[in-house]
Image: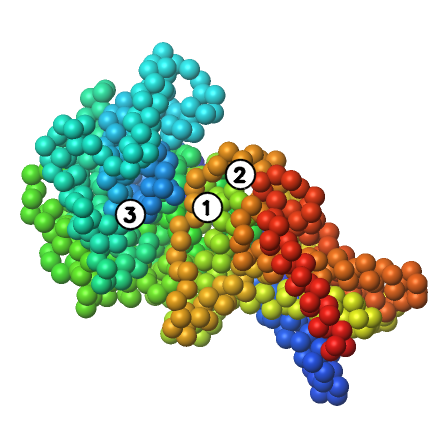
């Protein structure tokens, strides 16, 4: 049967186990909350109220998380059968949209590698177009792609001739590849191209004497002294045209177009969503691909057949007419062996996404999403008639009228009084436009599919230092709060508009920053009570302890089984994910709540910052060794540093109480919680007092944390 299929799906074998566990665990959680309510009625105290709040948030977040486990499915695709259903000449046109924003944080050579990896797709080149959005408006980026296009004329036929799988040159040449007669020449060409680009990056500008083509010289002349990244005109440059440009073997080259949208200091730019919407309009005018792939600038192709895998769903004669997009999971390269910063996001991208796929479909992850063009865009929204019958997908450099329209579509005032960003295109109003856009599409009745092949479709970079990792999470969860607190709230509008379980999945994501409430409570309250010899929980041999033990072991055990047994992850990676969850709860989550609150009240916040992709040698060494990098004075480090010291002090005090006064039964739970945090805090203690390298915690921050921990202890003694 498999030979007759383009794809298949099956419910995971663990589904009924998930459901049975969810019912049992829900009953125990309900019993715990009822006990809290009884205590609040008969003996309300500040501590009982605080514990009820913490446990209620944990219960709510656990309940919404079970929606991911209700109906997880696994899919397979059979691209080898695609030719049985559709001929290659009937493949739809594919437009690839790649966004970059800052050549100092997203090195142009890396972005060029991403573009080269998709330009070399196993896809008809006359139906493939790649668009680069340079939101930093950098002449250096344009120069890099001019150089990359020249190299592409050698690289693409080389890859296809020898059936190369790693089609990012940087990855290919670093992976000890098989050597062919022309490999040395190709590598030398790449190194020369890379050297020229890096030289221009270091100089900070392009010397026009090095540009021979008159048309290109005219483009570079737009970088005037008044040009800035936040205020500049539209620049659109067709670098490769499939009606004109050929590779060294005489084959057709895909289209390659550089776009830097107009920006004005007086107009909102709407960050990545705004840049993508400009690319949607420009690509719709120039090539009008029926399928649109959105790709981050550091997410290079890891499988040249990825578009064919997406077509296995789009070209299926029995495909659901409401299928809007196919999502490939985010996967990362360069993560150290134990993933100390939990940068793989295995749960979100490879476990929970299977559950959403079993409902209405996985969320858009910001990259690796293949969209039907008419789903994310709308021909009538352009304000002029465009030819929707284009199938040969050609860009002629002589079509001045179309380029004039494209410049208009990329102007900063084009979206005024339109539905772009609200009902059309990628949606505005949040830093996490990817999740918000897919949520709105699902609300409108569109469905999505998670395509998760064994070989990752794309591989990208991830933060290699702790500050960048925490800042990234803070930015995401601030954006999630912006999604929840608007008129399209997942728990109200979402439940009315889609499968309620699917809406609760989105609710879970958008409210994750509230995990900071129970984490902060359990990181400080039992410990401060223990420091003051005040018992908070039931004795060891009383009934209440078994209730808490079941809830703790059940939650961690279920997560362990999902991650290690069914997910194929290692035990050490799972443990590091648990550690980072505690750290996020004391840093990224509460700061996301704080920044969102300040922004809602009209106060200025730090806003959007691109996570740096540049890795210094010392930072890289620490990361590869699996050592935490605290080498900056980040405010995000302060709360969990204080918490780690409070827990250490309380554990020592509890040990003394047990050793001197024999009060183990009274303080066992509090000592267990303190000890659990202490074990997870070892990298923090190490960074504070044991290390002498550049990645240790700055002395100023260490002293501030110690002073604050002591002050909290002294202040609490007055209360107790």
Q: Quadrant of residue 648?
A: bottom right
Q: Position of residue 483 (x, y in %)?
A: 42, 66
Q: Nearer the viewer, residue 417 or 603?
A: 603
Mark 2 and 3 residues: CB-CB less than 8 Å, in contact?
A: no
Which residue is painted at 66% across and 42% down in the image? 691
Secondary structure category for the residue under label 2: helix
Which residue is painted at 93% across and 63% down in the image? 660
Secondary structure category for the residue under label 1: loop
Residue with the mark numbered 3: 136
Q: Nearer the viewer, residue 458 or 517?
A: 517
Q: CA distance from mark 2 to mark 3?
A: 26 Å
Which residue is painted at 56% across and 45% down in the image? 631
Can the viewer see residue 454?
yes
Q: Quadrant of residue 268?
A: bottom left
Classed neighbour count for the residue bearing mark 1: other residues with Cα under 10 Å, few (<14), some (14–19), many (≥20)? many
Q: CA distance from mark 3 to mark 1?
A: 24 Å
Q: Looking at the image, is mark 1 or mark 2 earlier in the sequence?
A: 1
Mark 3 and 1 residues: CB-CB less than 8 Å, in contact?
A: no
Q: Position of residue 649 (x, y in %)?
A: 76, 60
Relative to 636, is 133 on the left or the right? Answer: left
Q: Which mark is residue 619?
A: 2
Depicted 598 relative to depicted 13: above or below: below
Q: Which mark is residue 330?
A: 1
Depicted 620 relative to depicted 352: above or below: above
Q: Position of residue 518 (x, y in %)?
A: 63, 68
Which residue is painted at 43% across and 56% down in the image? 363
């Amino acid at each position: 049967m498999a030979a007759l299929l383009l794809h298949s799906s099956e419910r995971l074998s663990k589904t009924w186990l998930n459901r049975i566990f969810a019912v049992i665990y829900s009953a125990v959680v309900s019993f715990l909350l009822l006990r809290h309510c009884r205590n609040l009625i008969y003996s309300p105290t500040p501590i009982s109220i605080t514990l009820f709040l913490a446990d209620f948030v944990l219960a709510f977040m656990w309940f919404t998380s079970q929606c991911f486990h209700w109906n997880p499915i696994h899919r397979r695709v059979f691209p080898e059968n695609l030719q049985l259903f559709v001929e290659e000449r009937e493949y739809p046109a594919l437009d690839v949209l790649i966004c970059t924003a800052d050549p100092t944080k997203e090195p142009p050579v890396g972005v060029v590698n991403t573009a080269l990896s998709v330009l070399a797709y196993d896809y008809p080149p006359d139906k493939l177009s790649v668009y680069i959005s340079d939101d930093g408006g950098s002449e250096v980026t344009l120069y890099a792609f001019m150089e990359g296009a020249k190299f592409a004329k050698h690289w693409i036929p080389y890859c296809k001739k020898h059936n190369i799988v790693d089609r990012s040159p940087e990855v290919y040449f670093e992976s000890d590849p098989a050597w062919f007669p022309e490999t040395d020449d190709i590598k030398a060409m790449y190194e020369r191209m890379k050297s020229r680009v890096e030289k221009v990056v270091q100089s900070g500008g392009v010397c026009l004497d090095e540009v021979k083509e008159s048309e290109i010289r005219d483009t570079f002349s737009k970088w005037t002294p008044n040009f800035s990244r936040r205020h500049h005109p539209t620049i659109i440059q067709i670098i490769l045209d499939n009606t004109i440009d050929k590779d060294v073997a005489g084959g057709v080259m895909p289209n390659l177009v550089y776009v830097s949208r107009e920006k004005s200091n007086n107009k909102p730019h709407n960050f990545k969503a705004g840049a993508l919407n400009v690319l949607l309009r420009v690509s719709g005018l120039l090539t009008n691909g029926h399928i649109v792939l959105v790709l981050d600038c550091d997410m290079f192709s890891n499988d040249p057949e990825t578009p064919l895998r997406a077509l296995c769903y789009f070209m299926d004669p029995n495909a659901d007419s409401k299928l809007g997009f196919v999502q490939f999971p985010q996967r990362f390269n360069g993560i150290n062996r134990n993933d100390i910063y939990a940068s793989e996001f295995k749960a979100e991208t490879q476990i929970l996404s299977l559950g959403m796929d079993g409902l209405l479909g996985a969320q858009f992850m910001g990259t690796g999403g293949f969209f039907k063009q008419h789903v994310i865009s709308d021909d009538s929204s352009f304000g002029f008639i465009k030819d929707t019958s284009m199938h040969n997908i050609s860009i002629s450099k002589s079509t001045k009228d179309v380029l004039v329209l494209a410049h208009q579509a990329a102007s900063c005032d084009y979206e005024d009084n339109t539905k772009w960003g609200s009902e059309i295109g990628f949606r505005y109003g949040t830093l996490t436009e990817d999740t918000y856009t897919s949520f709105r599409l699902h609300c409108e009745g569109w469905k999505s599919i998670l395509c998760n092949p064994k070989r990752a479709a794309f591989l990208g970079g991830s933060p290699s230092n702790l500050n960048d990792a925490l800042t990234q999470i803070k930015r995401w969860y601030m954006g999630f709060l912006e999604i929840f607190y608007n008129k399209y709230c997942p728990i109200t509008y979402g439940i009315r508009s889609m499968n309620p379980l699917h809406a609760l999945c989105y609710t879970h994501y958008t409210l994750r920053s509230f995990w900071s409430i129970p984490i902060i409570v359990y990181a400080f309250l039992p410990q401060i009570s223990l420091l003051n010899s005040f018992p908070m929980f039931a004795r060891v041999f009383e009934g209440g302890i078994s209730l808490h033990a079941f809830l703790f072991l059940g939650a961690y055990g279920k997560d362990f089984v999902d991650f290690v047994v069914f997910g194929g992850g290692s035990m050490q990676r799972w443990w590091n994910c648990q550690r980072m969850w505690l750290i996020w709860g004391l840093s990224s989550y509460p700061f996301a709540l704080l920044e969102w609150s300040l922004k809602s009240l009209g106060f200025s916040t730090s806003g959007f910052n691109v996570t740096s992709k540049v890795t210094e040698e010392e930072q890289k060494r620490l990361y590869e060794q699996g050592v935490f990098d605290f080498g900056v004075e980040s405010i995000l480090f302060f709360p969990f540093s204080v918490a780690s010291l409070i827990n250490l002090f309380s554990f020592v005090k509890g040990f003394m109480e047990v050793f001197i006064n024999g009060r183990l039964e009274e303080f066992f739970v509090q000592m267990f919680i303190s000890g659990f945090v202490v074990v997870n805090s070892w990298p923090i203690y190490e960074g504070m007092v044991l290390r002498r390298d550049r990645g240790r915690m700055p002395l100023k921050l260490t002293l501030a944390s110690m002073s604050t921990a002591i002050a909290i202890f002294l202040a609490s003694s007055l209360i107790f």
